[in-house]
Structures are given as C-alpha cells and as structure tokens.
Amino acid sequence: MVNHTPFGRLSQRAQLAALRPVALVASRAFGVKPASLRCINHGFNTTYAVIDDNGAKYALRLNTHSLRDLVGVLAEQQWITALSDAPNIIVPKPLRTSAGQPFVEVPFAAMHKTLIATMAQWLPGRIVGDKPSRQQLYQLGALTAHLHRQSRLWRPTDDAQFPLVNQLLMNSTDHISDAPTSLIPRDVRALIDEVRLHIDLVYAQLNARMSVQPIHADLHTYNVMWHHNALAVFDFDDAGLGLPIQDLAITLYYVRDIPYADAEVWAGYRSVQSDLHVSPDVVESLLIGRGILLLNDLLVLSTPADYEYLPEFVRRMRLRLQHFIDTGTFALRK
C-alpha cells in the first residue's frame, strides 16, 4: 500500500525507512557493499556510517535538504580533494563511483526529487562537540587559518562552481519574511527586521574592503573530529565563496558560553595567519546573524525533531535579539 503522507509529516523512523533503500543504492554505486548501514545524523542532510563486508568503514551523505546543485557538489569535492594534499589539514578522502564520478544521483519519490549522494573514507576519532578543551579550540582556530591560507588562491575548475555566501542568509532563500505568525510572532519579526538592517550594512562594509574566497561556512565543533591530538574537518556542504571572518564567527557562535573560547580560537588563528582586522562589534553582528540564518533554515527542515524544536528556538532568538539590540553584543541566551 502506497503511503501518501508528505515526507515532512512522517515520523523519524518512517523517514529513515524510506531513505534506507536510497542509501543502499548509493553505497553500491561507489563500489561499497554494505554489511552494516547505520544512520548517524538525520537533519539538514542524512549521514550514514557504512561498513563493507571487508570491515572498511565509510561515511555516506545524502543531500536530503541541501541547497547544493551539481556544479556546487563538484566544487565541494574538488576542494576536499585539494585540501587532502595540503599541509596541516586533515579531511575525509572522497570516494568515486564505479563510473569515476564524485557523486551519484538517486531518485527519491517520497520527496519528489533526486538526492545527491557523496561518500568518503571514515575519519577516526570522536566529534569534539559541546565541550571543547582549550587545546581543541586553539587548534580549531589554527585549522581555520590553514583552510583560509590554502583557499586564498585556489578555485574550482571546469564546470564546478561555488555559490556566493557573503551575506546574512548566505545562499538560502528568505523563509522568514513569509513565515506565518504562528511560527514567528509579530514581536520577534520586528526584532529580526531591526537587526537585519544593521547586519546588511555590516556585510556591505565588509564586502567593500574584502575579497571572497572559498570558506567552509559551517565550521563548528560538531564538524571536527579529534584523533591523536589533531583535528580533522568534515561536512563541506555549506562551503561557498565568502569572507574568512564568517568562518570564525560561525565557530564562535556555538561556543560563546565558554569563557575562554574566543581567546583560544583567535590565538590559534593568529598563530598561522595575520589578523583579519575586524572590529569586535562586527564580530558580534555576525554572531547574531548566524542565529537568524539558523532560524531561516529551521523553518523549512522536515524532520520531526526540527518541528518540535522550532518554537523553543524562536523563544531563544527573542531573548538573543533583544539582548543584541540592548547591548550590541551576542549571548547564547536561553
């Protein structure tokens, strides 16, 4: 019997059941015969830990909600490949399909679209997560600087192309402006509108004096692995042509409630790369802007967990926006 329930209204168990055949087809396209297929993340994208019949382990990503088009995926895979040869940078080594392609497209009727899948060798270690040490934060700053140093002169080739992400909503469609008051109350929308005007001005000033280059654009402690006292970075799905300060602001957003985090990240960055010469108030503006971007993306995600979390995130954003308006600084108010 055909299930006509929209994918976004299915339970997480039902969504993953629908996606599993896609993951199996995609794995085999990369020449991997799964003996084990385990979902480790189901949100903006869906990621699986795949173990083949020889015991080798891989990471398979289905671009479930990704904004990536084919030329963007090509650029992403080209950059990861280039970074794998760069000093002081550890990234997952991409696999190619049996046809020699860096991705595979698999039709997915439940979402009425074709999903793009990529696969890479598994990175050993553990995700740093929400309790990074001083050493890990320092290394994250240094890693960010190494990425920026490599990408300053590197660009995708042939048909590959990164999107521009050097603005508040990066390359996302504006979902906030049309959101109903049941999702974003009028007082929260008024706060967002006031802050957005300020942030748009900040970006205009930054773009007037800085050049864009490839940036990771989602460089936080849940996208780095810690193994043998070294960091590896993964999840380049948001990478695009942006401003280096955006990467640092994204990192700092998630660790703002750790007293020593800012100092360690900046110290690590400056140990490799010269200062970016941005004022503290610019950084604070980019931090609150990250919150607005996350809210914008959360409005269109379709997992049950996202639906449940949205009202709570809106409540927190009300506090964070008001705090920014009152003080000019960002705080992870809860």
Image (cartoon, rainbow, N blue to C red):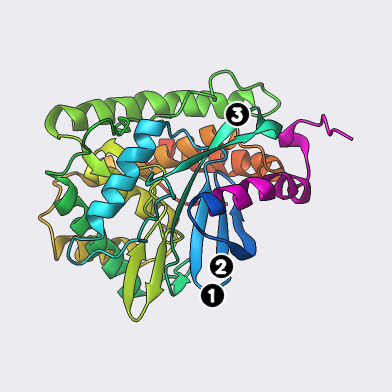
Q: Crowding at label 1, few (<14), some or many (≥20) Cα neighbours within 10 Å?
A: few
Question: Given contact means CB atoms under 8 Å apart, are the residues at marks 1 and 2 in contact?
Answer: yes
C-alpha span from label 3 to label 2: 28 Å
Magenta stretch: dominant secondary structure: helix
Q: Is residue 141 above or below residue 192?
A: below
Which percent across, then down, holds residue 31?
A: 49, 56
Q: Nearer the viewer, mark 3 or mark 2?
A: 2
- Disc 3 or 2, which lies upstream in sequence? 2
Tell me which amino acid carries mark 3: Lys
Q: Is residue 80 left or right of residue 16?
A: left
Q: Are marks 3 and 1 in contact (CB under 8 Å)?
A: no
The residue beneath circle 2 is 52
Where is mark 1, residue-wise?
55
Mark 3 or mark 1: which is in front? Answer: 1
Looking at the image, which residue is at 36% across and 54% down?
Answer: 251
Left or right: 290 with respect to 141? right
Residue 241 on the magenta segment: no
Element on which disc 1 rests: loop
The CA distance from mark 3 to mark 1 is: 32 Å
Residue picked out by circle 3? 113
Q: Which residues are magenta?
A: 1-27
Secondary structure under tag 3 reads strand
Residue 177 visible in this rendered orientation of the protein: yes
Find residue 143 and report its horizontal and vertical position in percent.
25, 62
- Neighbours of disc 3 within 10 Å: few (<14), some (14-19), many (20+): few
